[in-house]
Image (spheres, rainbow, N blue to C red):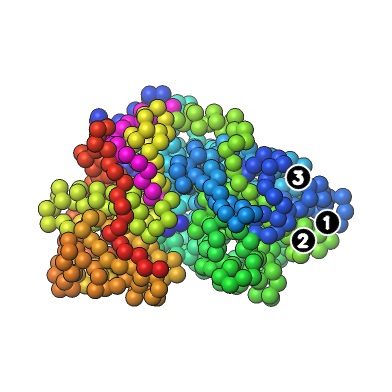
Amino acid sequence: MSATPRTRRRTWRLVTGTVSLAAVGALVAAMPAGAHGKPGHGGGHDHAKPGHGHGHGRTVDVQLLSFNDLHGNLEPPAGSSGQVTEDQHDGTTKAIDAGGAEYLATSLRTARKGNPYSVTAAAGDMVGASPLLSGLFHDEPTIEALNKMKLDVAGVGNHEFDEGRAELNRLQKGGCHPEDGCYTKGRKFRGADFPYLAANVTDEKTGKPILKPYTVWKKNGVKIGFIGVTLEGTPDIVSAEGVKGLKFHDEVETVNKYARELERKGVKSIVALIHEGGAPASKSYNYDCDASGAGDGISGPIVDIAKGITPKVDALVTGHTHEAYVCTIPDPAGKPRTVTSASSFGKLYTDTTLTYDRKTKDIVRTSVSSANHVVTRTQPKAKDITRLISDWNELAAPIAAQPVGHISGDLPGRGATTPESPLGDVIADAQLAHAKSLDDTAVLALMNPGGIRSDLVYKASGSEGDGVVTYGEAFTVQPFSNTVNLVTLTGEQLVTALKQQVSGGNEASPKILQVSEGLTYTLDYTKSGADRVVADTIRLNGEPIDPAASYRVAMNSFLAGGGDGFAALGEGTDPLVGADDLAAFNDYLTATTSADNPLDPPKADRITVVK
């Protein structure tokens, strides 16, 4: 999902002082068997019967387990970020707590039982925008966890490029971090046991893929090829430094190219891992995506991509939008083809049965069945993953447990169901406060929604007590290490930027900027494109925006570079670079809250929404 990229490593400033990474080192899967839900759940596709086609005839059933957008969430995500919605038979919905690497590992291991032909794949963003437990250590803990889960193959996502090409290569091949070194004495990071695939990412100079474009999974004569691509628009949502020297190519053209190459090599069964996705009509993981009623189905970039990918590809595992779906989208020949996505943060996994014909060496498409399953937290934890989390937590504890502020209730951010979120308001206010400390002419702050990675939850995550915000919790919200930048915009540029939230590349999937106190306007979803932002309602401290006037505006360095389709923000002049955005957020909480005076969740009423 679009987000603010990490542009540099963060200096670990705490309320009580500074602790370096070196000092820290010195201080130290869906439900269980029989509980996968009711038959037919997961988009109306029946799940194949266990034990069928296990290699004793012409066909053999291959189990494909898949997930996407883990984002280093080794521990169960907090609040609504750690829940999935389930449709009930009576027409109501139910929220189910889900996710956590200990449970994902158990789910995958349980699902594999009785399936001798089982392969596990991921569709990008396994790392990046990660909570402190993983992000503090450059996501080494997540790679180690995925190795233990026996992940066979992963496509890259946009967040695999947050720290640049060299760091992605290190995650693949291993070795200690070039700046922070090894985190445990005498122990060297070995890298991913699985191949990362980046078919549509090439070196600008050589034109060659920077990683393997595809891999072939083999067992007892059964061969399935996997092609991995990320979205072509990755440079628009990752910092320029992260994609320096790289070129990103069209997803359809790339997959079709390598599907032909695989076929020439005798591999006719092919799965595409695509880090791009869509939006189903329902948020429920067990929604029947193939329902034929008005307003049903799926929309978004993956629809056209799926329709353009050659029929040589038998199934598409997708991601990026953090949605849950199991859909059928016709290939260019009009033949039905399964397209899946398993939400995010390890809350779901997809179980797909691919019937492999030993004679044709191809998948029998009419036999493909698939369903999403919840990674419940009522099943046993995987003990090896628990030990891994405990070991890394011991290293992170001196930083993670530091209190930085107090809240009186939940602050929905990532999990908010409205365009403007309470947490987004607080972050924008914090950035404006920091900007004013540098330049008292600052009047406004803007925050991109994709840079808010979680909620702030009132309930304690550890022993700190309810309502206490810890450094680790704040890091989970803003993990990217951007700076708070100040630029001067004309009123015309500011209005243009607000219209870019819902037009151009953002029209199909709006990116509503979170705004600081004082800015108000109406967002009318009954209109289309830029007209959704009702220009004559835009007010700053009660006054209309003057197109010819100049305004000093704060935003993170990603937005200041025109990221997320906000070209107008990239046109700002007289730049002033401030502190780390997380430091600004923590300083604001520390300065304005206490145990006796906690922060009350804002009403999130700065933007009036008309539907």
For the record, the magenta segment spans 394-414
Number of the label disc, if any, that sits on residue 367: 2
- Residue type for callout 2: Ser
Of the pair 25 and 245, the residue shown nearer to us: 25
Q: Which of the marked residues, 3 or 2, is nearer the chain's N terminus?
A: 3
> Could you tell me which quadrant the N terminus lies in?
bottom left
Residue at the (64%, 54%) spot, across then down: 89
Q: Is residue 113 magenta?
A: no
Number of the label disc, if any, that sits on residue 115: 3
Whether label 1 touches label 2, CB < 8 Å: yes
**Marks 3/1: CA–CA distance:** 14 Å
**Marks 3/2: CA–CA distance:** 17 Å
- Residue type for callout 3: Asn
Residue at the (53%, 40%) spot, across then down: 100
Identify residue for label 1: 59
Of the pair 289 and 499, the residue shown nearer to us: 289
Q: Which of the marked residues, 3 or 1, is nearer the chain's N terminus?
A: 1
